[in-house]
Image (cartoon, rainbow, N blue to C red):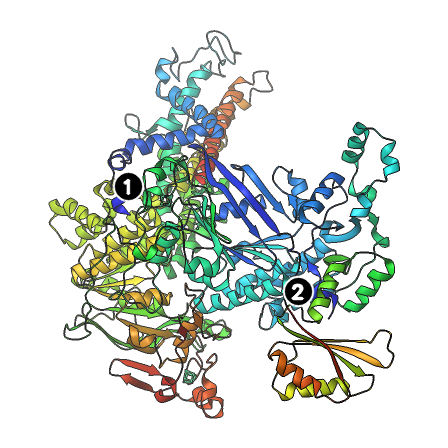
């Protein structure tokens, strides 16, 4: 058979490059309307977060005492809050916290927002636990799964509150909380994927080469769990943003005056009855749109992945 | 069927059927102008390699083409009425429940959460308005009709509580409850053991006669075709290339493709020294690459001429009832065929079983799996531990450079034996020595040097490669791990290995999803041979492949083995392949080797009764050969409580040759009797007696 | 010898809504004269025959070509079929001679075969006549001998004994009272194992019986 196929065409054309595969991936997404809609919303927030300083003349903490609780106007497109701060500005600086930068202390910050870092850490611990349980099985699996079951028995919000109450509200601690809360779900997903993948012959092939447990877990199994894991992570970023909002609303978010979306809703709520709903409305819309965007993107991606399986 | 003076109308008449799928390459034709007829009480075999459109034809008849498939032209007349061009609702009425399909995987047709009884009775209650009690009674009758043991009880069980063969019987019973005029079976026995397959095939033949059902039987196994089909239609790349009564087809294949297929399958009783397998070069073109104004087989045909490349041959009748789609059909003499230079044929030298030293030495090897007992006592560690005796006292000596075949039904311990040797399971007792070193420990605790010498080729081409890495990366890994070659030579070595398995260097960067089944299997072989191992275990390496690919892969294995002087343990269920490939054969049943000997010795009397039954079950690709009809009843018993005495006594058809219907077999372990120095049989029946038996297969 | 053994299984059927034109096509193409009409689950609701489809010339002459076409294309099976209860049917365990009697007495050509209301087959005149030919062994080549025997017990046994004594088998046999000759029966047997002369010799030796005809028959 090989002889017949050893043609020039074959050698030249069928050589796939990384770029080609990447492009195929992108065009796959492009085929799904759902995914495109989601991607548009999400990119919007990423862009405004990145370019925040250029998209507004104000700073997030600039106050204008003459203009408190103002409705939208040309100067303040989304209005101002009870301290006369521009809501648009606070919103896009808030998006930075969620997506772009993680403040460690006054002067130091890490790239990647709170939600992203939280989910990423959850992904790391969850994957390790899930891989261990799923691949090794036996008592390790029992222990890991019982532990995670116990955690999943708590309502998510309660879990957040307990954790934040225990370690105090700060950007880093919220990251920890998101990671801890996300771990059991991710671990379960990875475990179930692992249970499936570990029955494949290529895992046998690795084992009979005498590969180490770590090699098999991270080189043979994990890359094949990638697809569903990415989709899941996307959804989780959405949940995390939502959770951040909730925490902020409950007063467990980033300490003021951070432009935390949840805290903004919480503060703004007090003025709804007084006739200025803007301060509560816009951050709620922001949270909702980002969460929906991520969900749409994840759903579309999942469908496309399933179709081309 | 009764003699008739006027012929009955055919149940199904397909004319010029073309089916296309909308794909990313646009609309591609998967089936082109196919015509055939199915009559009452006859079986039409639809054969051809994977991707030739067999299933598509079936789905076209059933209107199951899915959202992207459609019938482009042609006519399908079922029971006199045209199906093409009707609305879905009309079709439902027209077909009624008169067409039923049976799939390869019986679980596709069974609902795992309902009992067998509920599912069977539902067919009658819903479609026929038959009262529940009556439906139940008839379902039991039908189960008995398909020889289901203990039918009333089976009615209460769930599908997963039945074996594969039993599930397939349930599906067939379910199909027949509708009393369909047409039954379409898509590889219904491919997933079953030979012994079970033989029983199901007998059943199908009998049902066809008793119910006057017309059957379309889709398969790629020429042996099965020879056994149960009356008419055969050979498909290639979406076209029907030859159509004939079965005996006629096997006696005088007219189309070069059919002739090629027949050269790919090892005939039972043929060895690698005396005969070659000739794969058909190239492979089935994908639907979007199929030429229109030319013979579709031309790129692979040894007789192709200029005309073949410029004009499309039509299906024409060459002899009465025998048509072929080839310009030169009837003029080509297949006996004058010479292999073209493009196919690589291995050189095989006969080997003697001694003198080279021993590679693997197994002595009374036992591998038991602990079965958690369900009793309450076990919670406190008091319950009696139960053991699945997967391998129970196997002794085997494998000399260097030799291939030992292992055959037996599924569940008889073949794969466990392989896993124990390779170190994925630890033996419970016994001696396991490789090159003189003890290897009775799991692979993780073996020395790297030993690991490197012991590799494996797997069965399923789709899972043998990691989809996340390229071919090159996967072949390179063992080279890096075992430092077979210095790091800077790894790339060259991979290319060399690719070359050895006849893949060109462009495959280095391909991902598994871009390979065909046969190519994946080649990469699997390259990976196994990368560390230049002394012993390679092959667990059903070709059973998932098409015949022509199978021939190529077998040739490749033979060639590589010869080149590297590798010793092989070849596990397979296809007795013709094992016979062809192996120097020695071990027949396993329930954890025991019941017969061991050279390949020739195994396939001629004296036989162990189990070997005899296996041989009589293999479908042989020759409708004129006669085969003794020995069918084993029931399934392989559970290895949890293997039968006492001779493990085979519960199913042995030869026990009655002994005194007292073979009482002795139930109590005493049979002796190991040596027929020749290298051939032994584990049975109470004296060898003289066994020698007197007729050979299972006689060809005319 | 029951209907179930000789009927045609899986008969072509139509539904009540099939158009007359289509049924005519089906009948012509497949060379059949009777088509059972079924609804869901193959339950019998009627029967169409060539007769049902015939339109009387008087009716026709009053219409012009366009009207005929319109009439035909609008007509459905349910408009012309013999309806449910009026269809005379058989079951698989009806003896074939009983089926023949029904066909003759009702002057009809076919019987749909039902099992609990579901059509499992159809048996027609020609099926029964075909079986008559089988009964007398037309399908096997050999010698067909007609022997006239007195109407009393043991005569048939004499024939079988004589044939068996030579080790031949009787491939088919049938007997009827001799027409216009009371007190005698004509027995027809079919034997393929013997030569004509051997057979004649053996049969002529039987006392009290007369070999009145011997000839070769076969497909
Ligand atoms: N839904 C689909 N969409 C596009 N192409 C399809 C689809 N189903 C099948 N094909 C293509 O049509 C061709 C015929 O496929 P089909 O499944 O009928 O082959 P087959 O002869 O049944 O093969 P096998 O022996 O593997 O079952 C193949 O090339 C296949 O890739
Ligand atoms: S028509 Fe030509 S190419 Fe096609 S099968 Fe015949 S000889 Fe071969
Ligand atoms: S020992 Fe008895 S049961 Fe076992 S194979 Fe021989 S005859 Fe059969
Ligand atoms: Mg198929």
The chain containing the residue under callout 1 comes to B
> Which residue is painted at 78% across and 77% down in the image?
C186
Nearest the eye: B70 or B413 = B70
Work out whether A67 lies above or below B296: above
Residue B328 is marked as none
Dot 1 or dot 2: first in sequence order is 2
Nearest the eye: B255 or A16 = B255
Residue B144 located left or right of residue B467: right
Per the model, the C-alpha gap separating discs 1 and 2 is 52 Å
> Which residue is painted at 37% across and 86% down in the image?
B670
Q: Position of residue A305 (x, y in %)?
A: 43, 38
For residue B289, what is the image quadrant?
top left
**Quadrant where the C terminus of chain B lies?**
bottom left
Mark 2 residue CB less than 8 A from any atom of ligand 4: no
- The count of marks equals 2
Work out whether A16 lies above or below B54: above
Q: Position of residue B209 (x, y in %)?
A: 60, 64
Residue A216 located left or right of residue B131: left
Residue B647 makes an appearance in the image: yes
> Which residue is painted at 79% across and 48% down in the image?
C48
Could you say whether the residue bearing mark 1 is in a helix, strand or loop?
loop
Work out whether B212 lies above or below A229: below
For residue C25, what is the image quadrant?
top right
Could you say whether the residue bearing mark 2 is in a helix, strand or loop?
helix
**Quadrant where the N terminus of chain B lies?**
bottom right
Residue A132 makes an appearance in the image: no
Residue B139 is marked as 2
The chain containing the residue under callout 2 comes to B
Residue, disc 1:
B510
């Amino acid at each position: 058979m090989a002889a017949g196929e050893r043609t020039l065409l074959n050698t030249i054309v069928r050589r796939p490059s990384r770029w080609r595969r990447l492009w195929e991936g992108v065009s796959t997404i492009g085929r799904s309307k759902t995914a495109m809609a989601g991607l548009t919303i999400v990119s919007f927030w990423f862009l405004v977060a990145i370019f925040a300083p250029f998209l507004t003349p104000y700073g997030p903490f600039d106050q204008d005492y003459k203009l408190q609780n103002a409705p939208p106007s040309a100067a303040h497109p989304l209005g101002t809050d009870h301290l006369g701060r521009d809501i648009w500005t606070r919103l896009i600086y808030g998006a930075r916290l969620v997506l772009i930068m993680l403040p460690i202390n006054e002067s130091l910050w890490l790239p990647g927002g709170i939600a992203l870092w939280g989910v990423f850490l959850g992904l790391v611990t969850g994957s390790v636990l899930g891989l261990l349980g799923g691949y090794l099985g036996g008592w390790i699996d029992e222990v890991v799964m019982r532990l995670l079951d116990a955690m999943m028995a708590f309502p998510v919000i309660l879990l957040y509150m307990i954790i934040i109450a225990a370690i105090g509200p700060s950007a880093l601690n919220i990251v920890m909380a998101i990671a801890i809360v996300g771990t059991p779900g991710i671990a379960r997903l990875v475990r179930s994927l692992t249970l499936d993948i570990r029955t494949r012959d290529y895992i046998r092939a690795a084992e009979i080469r005498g590969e180490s447990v770590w090699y098999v877990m991270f080189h043979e199994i994990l890359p094949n769990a990638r697809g569903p894991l990415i989709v899941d992570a996307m959804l989780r970023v959405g949940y995390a943003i939502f959770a951040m909002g909730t925490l902020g609303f409950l007063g467990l978010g980033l300490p003021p005056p951070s432009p935390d979306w949840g805290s903004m809703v919480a503060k703004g709520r007090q003025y709804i009855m007084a006739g200025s709903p803007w301060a509560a409305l816009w951050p709620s819309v922001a949270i909702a749109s980002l969460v929906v965007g991520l969900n749409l993107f994840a759903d579309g991606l999942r469908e496309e992945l399933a179709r081309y399986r | 069927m009764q003699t008739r003076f006027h012929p009955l109308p055919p149940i199904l008449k397909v004319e010029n059927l073309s089916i296309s799928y909308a794909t990313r390459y646009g609309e591609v034709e998967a089936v082109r102008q196919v015509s055939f007829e199915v009559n009452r009480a006859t079986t039409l075999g639809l054969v051809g390699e994977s991707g030739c459109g067999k299933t598509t034809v079936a789905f076209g008849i059933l209107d199951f083409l899915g959202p992207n498939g459609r019938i482009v032209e042609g006519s399908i007349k079922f029971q006199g009425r045209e199906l093409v061009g009707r609305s879905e609702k009309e079709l439902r009425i027209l077909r009624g429940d008169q067409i039923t399909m049976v799939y390869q995987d019986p679980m596709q047709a069974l609902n795992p959460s309902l009992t067998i009884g509920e599912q069977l009775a539902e067919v009658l209650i819903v479609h026929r308005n038959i009262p529940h009690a009556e439906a139940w009674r008839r379902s039991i009758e039908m189960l008995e009709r398909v020889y289901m043991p203990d039918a009333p009880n089976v009615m209460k069980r769930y599908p997963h509580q039945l074996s594969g063969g039993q599930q397939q019987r349930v599906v067939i019973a379910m199909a027949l409850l509708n009393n369909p005029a047409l039954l379409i079976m898509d590889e219904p026995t491919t997933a079953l053991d030979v012994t079970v397959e033989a029983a199901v095939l007998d059943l199908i033949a009998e049902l066809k006669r008793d119910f006057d059902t017309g059957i379309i039987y889709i398969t790629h196994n020429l042996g099965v075709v020879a056994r149960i089909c009356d008419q055969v239609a050979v498909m290639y790349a979406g076209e029907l290339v030859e159509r004939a009564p079965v005996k006629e087809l096997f006696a005088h294949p007219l189309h070069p493709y059919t002739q090629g297929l027949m050269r790919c399958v090892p005939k039972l009783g043929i060895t690698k020294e005396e005969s070659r397998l000739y794969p058909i070069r190239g492979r089935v073109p994908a639907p979007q690459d199929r030429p229109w104004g030319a013979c579709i087989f031309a790129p692979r045909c040894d007789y192709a001429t200029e005309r073949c490349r410029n004009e499309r041959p039509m299906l024409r009748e060459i002899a009465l009832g025998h048509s072929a789609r080839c310009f030169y059909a009837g003029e080509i003499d297949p006996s004058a065929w010479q292999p073209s230079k493009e196919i690589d044929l291995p050189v095989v030298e006969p080997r003697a079983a001694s003198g080279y030293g021993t590679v693997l030495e197994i002595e009374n090897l036992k591998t038991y799996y602990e079965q958690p007992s369900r009793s309450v006592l076990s919670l406190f560690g008091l319950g009696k531990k139960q053991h699945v005796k997967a391998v129970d006292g196997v002794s085997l000596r494998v000399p260097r450079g030799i291939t030992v075949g292992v055959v037996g039904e599924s569940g008889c311990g073949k794969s466990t034996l392989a896993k124990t040797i390779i170190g994925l399971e630890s033996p419970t007792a016994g001696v396991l020595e490789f090159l003189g070193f003890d290897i009775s420990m799991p692979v993780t605790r073996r020395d790297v040097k030993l690991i490197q010498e012991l590799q494996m080729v797997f069965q399923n081409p789709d899972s043998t490669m990691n989809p996340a890495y390229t071919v090159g990366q996967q072949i390179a890994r063992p080279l890096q791990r075992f430092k077979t070659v210095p790091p800077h030579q790894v790339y060259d070595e991979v290319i060399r290995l690719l070359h050895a398995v006849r893949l060109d260097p462009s495959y280095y960067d391909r991902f598994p999803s871009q390979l065909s089944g046969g190519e994946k299997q080649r990469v699997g072989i390259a990976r196994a041979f990368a560390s230049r191992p002394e012993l390679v275990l092959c667990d059903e390496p070709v059973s998932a492949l098409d015949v022509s690919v199978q021939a190529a892969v077998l040739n490749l294995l033979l060639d590589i083995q010869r080149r590297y002087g590798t010793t092989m343990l070849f596990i397979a269920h296809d007795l013709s392949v094992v016979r062809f490939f192996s120097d020695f054969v071990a027949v396993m049943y329930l954890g025991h080797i019941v017969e061991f000997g050279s390949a020739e010795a195994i396939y001629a009397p004296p036989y162990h009764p189990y070997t005899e039954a296996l041989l009589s079950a293999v479908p042989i690709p020759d409708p004129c050969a006669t085969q003794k009809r020995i069918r084993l009843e029931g399934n392989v018993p559970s290895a949890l409580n293997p039968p006492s005495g001779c493990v085979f006594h519960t199913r042995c058809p030869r026990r009655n040759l002994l005194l007292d219907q073979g009482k002795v077999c139930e109590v005493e372990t049979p002796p190991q009797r040596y027929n020749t120095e290298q051939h032994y049989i584990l049975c109470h029946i004296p060898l003289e007696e066994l020698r007197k038996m007729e050979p299972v297969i006689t060809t005319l | 010898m029951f209907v179930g053994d000789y009927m045609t299984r899986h008969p072509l059927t139509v539904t009540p809504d099939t158009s007359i034109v289509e049924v005519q096509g089906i009948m012509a193409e497949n060379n059949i004269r009777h088509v059972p009409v079924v609804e869901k689950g193959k339950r019998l609701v009627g029967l169409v025959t060539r007769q049902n489809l015939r339109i009387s010339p008087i009716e026709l002459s009053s219409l012009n070509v366009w009207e005929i076409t319109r009439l035909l294309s609008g007509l459905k099976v349910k408009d012309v079929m013999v309806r449910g209860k009026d269809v005379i049917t058989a079951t698989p365990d009806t003896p074939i001679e009983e089926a023949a009697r029904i066909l003759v007495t009702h002057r009809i050509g076919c019987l749909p075969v039902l099992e609990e209301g579901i059509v499992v087959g159809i048996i027609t005149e020609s099926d029964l006549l075909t079986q008559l030919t089988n009964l007398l062994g037309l399908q096997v080549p050999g010698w067909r001998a007609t022997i006239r025997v007195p109407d009393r017990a043991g005569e048939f046994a004499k024939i079988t004994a004589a044939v068996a004594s030579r080790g031949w088998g009787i491939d088919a046999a049938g007997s009827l009272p001799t027409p216009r000759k009371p007190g005698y029966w004509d027995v027809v047997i079919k034997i393929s194992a013997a030569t004509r002369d051997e057979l004649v010799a053996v049969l002529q030796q039987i006392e009290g019986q007369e070999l009145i005809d011997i000839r070769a028959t076969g497909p």
